[in-house]
Amino acid sequence: METVLYPILADSENNAKKLEQKYARKYPIFYDPTKKVPKMLNQEVKLLKLGRMPGLLIIDKEGIIQYAYYGDSMSDIPENEILFEVLKKI
C-alpha cells in the first residue's frame, strides 16, 4: 500500500508554516489562501463552531474519490481503523 498525505489548509502561507512547524514536521502542509479547494470539495464553514469543518478525502491514483468524510465539528474526524480499511481496498 502506497499512501501519500496532502494536508491542505485554507489559510495563508504564514499560518500553514506555523502549523507545519508545530504539528506536522514530517509532512508539508499545503495552503490555499484563495479557498478554491475547500469550495470545490464542498467543505462547510460554520462560524458558531469555530470555522471550517474538517474534511477528509481518500483519492485513488486515478483521481477517483474512494472515501469522503465531512465533520460536524472540529473534533469530528473518522477513526484511523476506518481509514486503514479503505486504504487496504484501494
Image: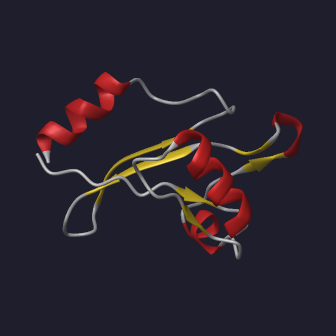
Estimate the x, y position of residue 67 in percent, counting from the top left. Answer: 34, 46
Q: Residue furthest right?
A: 48
Q: Is residue 25 left or right of residue 46?
A: left
Q: Residue at x 52, y 58 (%)?
A: 29
Number of residue marks: 0
From the viewer's side, name the closer residue of 85 and 30: 30
Foreground pick, 51 / 21: 21
Point out residue 48 in the picture as x, y percentages from the top left corner: 88, 37
The part of the image, by quadrant, that contains residue 81 is top left
Q: Residue at position x 82%, y 39% from top?
A: 50
State the image coordinates of residue 83 (x, y, percent, origin top left): 31, 34
- Is 57 situated above or below 77? below
Question: Is residue 48 found left or right of 82 in the rendered image?
Answer: right
Q: Please tell me whether residue 25 is drawn above or below residue 48 in the rendered image.
A: below
- Left or right: 8 with respect to 5? right
The residue located at (45%, 28%) in the rendering is 78
* Image x and y of residue 35, in percent: 68, 70
- Placement of 10 over or under 25, stated as above or below: below
Quadrant of residue 53 within the rendered picture: top right
| Residue found at x 64% / y 67% | 39
Q: Where 19 falls versus 40 (above or below)?
A: above
Name the image colouring.
secondary structure
Pick the quarter of the image with the N terminus. top left
